[in-house]
Amino acid sequence: MNASLPVGVVGVGALGRHHARHLASMHGAELVGVYDTHLGRAADVAAACGCRAFASLPDLLGCVKAVSVAVPTPFHREVGLECLGRGVAVLMEKPLATSLTEADELIAEAKCHEVVFAVGHVERFNMAVRAAMTVLDRPLFLEGIRLAPFQPRGTDVAVVLDLMIHDLDLASHLVGGAPAIDIRARGVSVLSSHLDMVNARVEFAGGAVASMTSSRVARDRVRRLRIFQPSGYISLDLATGTASFMRLRDGWRQGTGNSIEEVVEQAALSAPEADALGLELAAFVAAVRGEPAAIVTAAEGRTALAMAIDVTAAVKRSPAPTLGR
């Protein structure tokens, strides 16, 4: 396919407007237009991106071959089925859906129409994650911390689906897709009717364990992941896109050395600098064009969703805390 792929964006709120911005200047893609139930917002984004604001979703779908969908999670099923049912490829923002039943409906519709169906787990494209892949070797323990200040947007779902699902997907990806065999979690609702803070422990087949904490009632934003493996320790700052690798120095002998610097060497890890969302959208466009591309598949998105649902269920099963006197 040599001609530019006609694409659109469905939902141009806080995140979708950035989808439109990237697609408007992307090689191999032509941003035909955007659609949002807030017509004024759609008009503003269209004007900024040099494309058309469509008055209805069917009108947009009649003019494109692929769309990125960035509507609130409760509408993923409805919007996704309409897009896929018209044979339009979809990049669905995470989480894939609100339930596995909805996810399976969407996956079946994509299979029926033989169209690309990807999920927007953007942290896979983070520069720090891409750098870590160069030294990744059988992770045994992963520790993720993801904190954010409270904001009303996103509170239509629990923090597990809003934030932690990023780290659940990363953990699954980094351990090679091994299934989760045991999940335990504790959490609390603080400022919304859903869980706002959760700590989870996930054990994967093969023995790897991930410990994760996510909160949307924090003072500062934090996105960190640590990976422990036989060859060393990888530290990722997902907010800055930086990564480092600590390992034993060559030739070190047990019992020698007077400081950690004499025992351990630290090396900065690097990957080509690029915007993660831009890379995600470029991979989606390439996949729809029939080119090799490392998208996050709908099946992988379903796996992350299943883990998130299991974490939430584990919180509900956990005994209520008791306060000592």
Image (cartoon, helix red, strand yellow):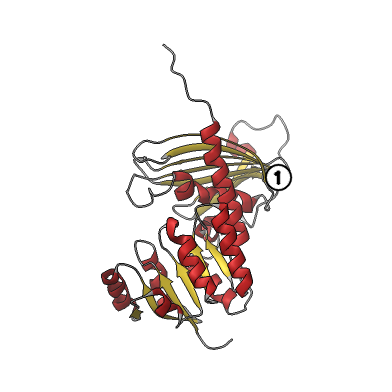
Name which residue type carries label 1.
Asp
Q: Is residue 25 visible?
A: no
Q: Work out whether residue 250 or residue 271 is closer to the camera in this orientation and state it.
A: 271
**For residue 42, which quarter of the picture?**
bottom left
- Read off the residue under disc 1: 250
Is residue 237 positioned above or below 295 on the image?
A: above
**In the image: residue 49, left or right of residue 199:** left
Task: Decide if residue 67 is in sight here.
Answer: yes
Q: Nearer the viewer, residue 289 or 73?
A: 73
Q: Position of residue 178 (x, y in %)?
A: 69, 49
Report whether 228 appears left or right of 18. right
Q: Position of residue 247 (x, y in %)?
A: 64, 44
Residue beneath the point at 46% across and 48% down: 163
Label 1 neighbour load within 10 Å: few <14, some 14-19, many 20+:
few
Q: Is residue 293 left or right of residue 150?
A: right
Relative to 325, residue 163 above or below: below
Q: Secondary structure at mark 1?
A: loop
Q: Quadrant of residue 301?
A: bottom right
Q: Position of residue 310 (x, y in %)?
A: 57, 42
Q: Quadrant of the N terminus?
A: bottom right
Residue at the far bottom in the pictured view: 3
Instruction: Report the residue at 56% width, 36% height from top.
Output: 314
Quarter the C terminus occupies: top left
